[in-house]
Amino acid sequence: MSLGLPGLTPFGPCTLHVVHNSFRKGLNSYGENAEQMAVDVFQWFKTHISQKEDYGFTLGDVQCRWLTLIPALEQINNHWKALRKYFLTDLPQRSKTDLTYAQLKNNTR
């Protein structure tokens, strides 16, 4: 049965739990900060509208994060050089009390 979604395996409710747990285990192996970084980048550009337009970040966070995390991390990977420049060079004077900025700066090193 094809739903017109090439590359996707049809999942039922029981297998979704296994997929979610597998994704979480893989994420833990990849790096615990990956998910937090994706959320932080989204939150940063959500509150800094002009930078959002400049960098084109539009992916957000949903309740089933694993559905949006891979596209968000791919977008971060595609913009990695620009993000590093932005957070490590363009904003070095930023207040060190901004927790999101501090986490992003640490994760882009």
Image: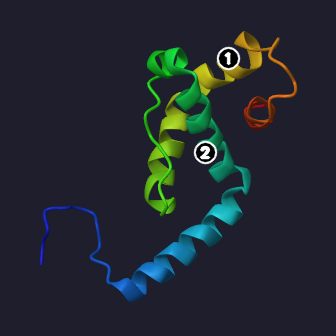
Q: In front: mark 2 or mark 1?
A: 2
Q: Is residue 104 left or right of residue 64?
A: right
| Residue 2 in the image: above or below residue 73 | below
Mark 2 residue crowding within 10 angstroms, few (<14) / some (14–19) / many (20+): many
| Residue 5 in the image: above or below residue 100 | below
The residue that label 2 is drawn on is 39
Determine the residue located farthest toward the right in the rendered image.
96
The image quadrant that residue 13 belongs to is bottom left
* Residue 85: x %, y % from top left: 67, 17
The image quadrant that residue 40 belongs to is top right
* Residue 105: x %, y % from top left: 77, 29
Q: Secondary structure at mark 1?
A: helix
Q: Is residue 29 left or right of residue 3?
A: right
| Residue 68 in the image: above or below residue 66 | above
Q: Residue at x 80, y 35 (%)?
A: 99
Q: Residue at x 60, y 69 (%)?
A: 24
Identify which amino acid the numbered label 1 is placed on. Lys
Distance between mark 2 and mark 1 Cα atoms: 19 Å
* Residue 84: x %, y % from top left: 68, 23
Which label sits on residue 97?
Answer: none
